[in-house]
Image (tube, helix red, strand yellow):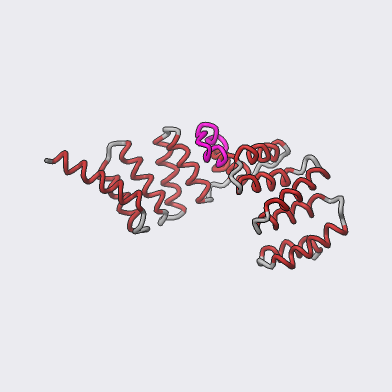
C-alpha cells in the first residue's frame, strides 16, 4: 500500500496525526501531484482548519486547473463558514470540470436553499436525488425544497419515500402532516404529528401544529 492510500486509511480510522504525516511524505515525494494536496485539504477540512484547507485546495488548483475535487473541497470550506455565494462558485466549477456526483449537486442546492432561493435550489437537489435515491438526507432536503416550491403532490411522494428508507424519521412525519393540512385532511395531519411525537417526544413543531389543529377542530364543533 502506497503512502497516499495508507494516509486515507488512517484518516478513516480517525488517526489524524498519522494521516497528516503520511500525506506530508506523499506530497514531498510528488510535489507536482495535486491529489496529495486535495487529500490533505480534506483532512484539514475534517479538522475544521479552514484556512489551511483552503490553501491546500488552491495549491492543487494551481497545479491542475481542472481538478474538480479541489473545487469541491474549496466549496465545502466556504460552506462550513456559511459563505454560500463563494461556495456556489466553487461547486459550479467542480461541476463544470466534470464532477457529476450526488454530493456536489446536493451541496450546490443547499447553498441556494440556505439563502432562500428555493427555485434555484430545486434542480440541483433533484439531480442529487436522482443520483442518490437511497440517501435519506438528500431525499428529505429535496422533499423540503419541493414543498417550498409549492409542489405538494411531489412533496408527499418524496417524503413517503423517506419514510420507506427510514421509518422513524420524525421530521418527514411532521412535514407529511403539513402536507395533509394543505390537502385539508386534518385527521391525517394529526396522525402524522402523533407519529412524529412518538418518534421524538420533544418535537416542538409537531406538538405546536397538533395543538393548533385540535383547537381549530374543537372550534368548528362548538
| Magenta range | 110-124
Q: Is residue 8 magenta?
A: no
Q: x and y percent of residue 97 in the render?
A: 73, 38
Residue that sits furthest to the front in the current view = 51
Residue shown at the point (74%, 64%) measured from the top left: 19
Residue shown at the point (47%, 53%) measured from the top left: 165
Residue shown at the point (43%, 37%) measured from the top left: 147
Quadrant of the rendered image containing residue 91: top right
Residue shown at the point (28%, 37%) measured from the top left: 184
Q: x and y percent of residue 213 in the render?
A: 25, 44
- On screen, residue 173 versus residue 14, left or right, reads left
- Report the number of discs: 0
- On screen, residue 209 versus residue 220, left or right, reads right
Q: Is residue 116 magenta?
A: yes
Residue 183 to residue 171: above or below: above
Quarter that holds the C terminus:
top left
- On screen, residue 140 versus residue 210, left or right, reads right
Quarter that holds the N terminus:
bottom right
Residue 211 to residue 23: above or below: above
Q: x and y percent of residue 207 in the render?
A: 31, 51
Front residue of 85 and 190: 85
Q: x and y percent of residue 9 in the render?
A: 71, 64
Front residue of 50 and 194: 50
Q: Overall secondary structure of the magenta stretch?
A: helix
Amino acid at each position: 500500500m502506497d503512502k497516499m492510500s495508507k494516509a486515507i486509511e488512517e484518516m478513516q480510522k480517525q488517526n489524524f496525526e498519522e494521516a497528516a504525516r503520511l500525506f506530508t511524505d506523499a506530497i514531498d515525494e510528488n510535489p507536482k501531484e495535486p491529489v496529495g494536496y486535495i487529500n490533505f485539504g480534506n483532512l484539514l477540512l475534517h479538522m475544521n482548519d479552514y484556512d489551511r484547507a483552503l490553501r491546500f485546495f488552491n495549491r492543487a488548483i494551481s497545479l491542475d486547473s481542472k481538478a474538480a475535487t479541489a473545487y469541491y473541497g474549496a466549496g465545502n470550506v466556504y460552506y462550513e463558514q456559511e459563505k454560500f455565494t463563494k461556495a456556489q462558485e466553487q461547486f459550479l466549477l467542480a461541476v463544470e470540470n466534470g464532477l457529476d456526483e450526488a454530493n456536489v449537486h446536493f451541496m450546490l442546492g443547499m447553498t441556494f436553499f440556505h439563502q432562500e432561493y428555493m427555485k434555484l435550489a430545486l434542480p440541483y437537489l433533484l439531480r442529487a436525488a436522482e443520483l442518490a435515491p437511497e440517501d435519506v438526507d438528500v431525499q428529505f432536503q429535496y422533499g423540503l425544497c419541493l414543498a417550498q416550491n409549492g409542489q405538494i403532490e411531489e412533496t408527499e411522494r418524496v417524503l413517503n419515500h423517506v419514510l420507506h428508507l427510514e421509518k422513524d424519521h420524525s421530521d418527514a412525519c411532521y412535514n407529511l402532516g403539513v402536507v395533509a393540512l394543505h390537502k385539508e385532511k386534518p385527521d391525517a395531519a394529526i396522525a402524522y404529528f402523533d407519529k412524529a411525537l412518538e418518534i421524538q417526544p420533544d418535537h416542538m413543531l409537531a406538538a405546536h401544529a397538533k395543538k393548533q389543529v385540535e383547537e381549530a377542530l374543537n372550534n368548528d364543533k362548538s
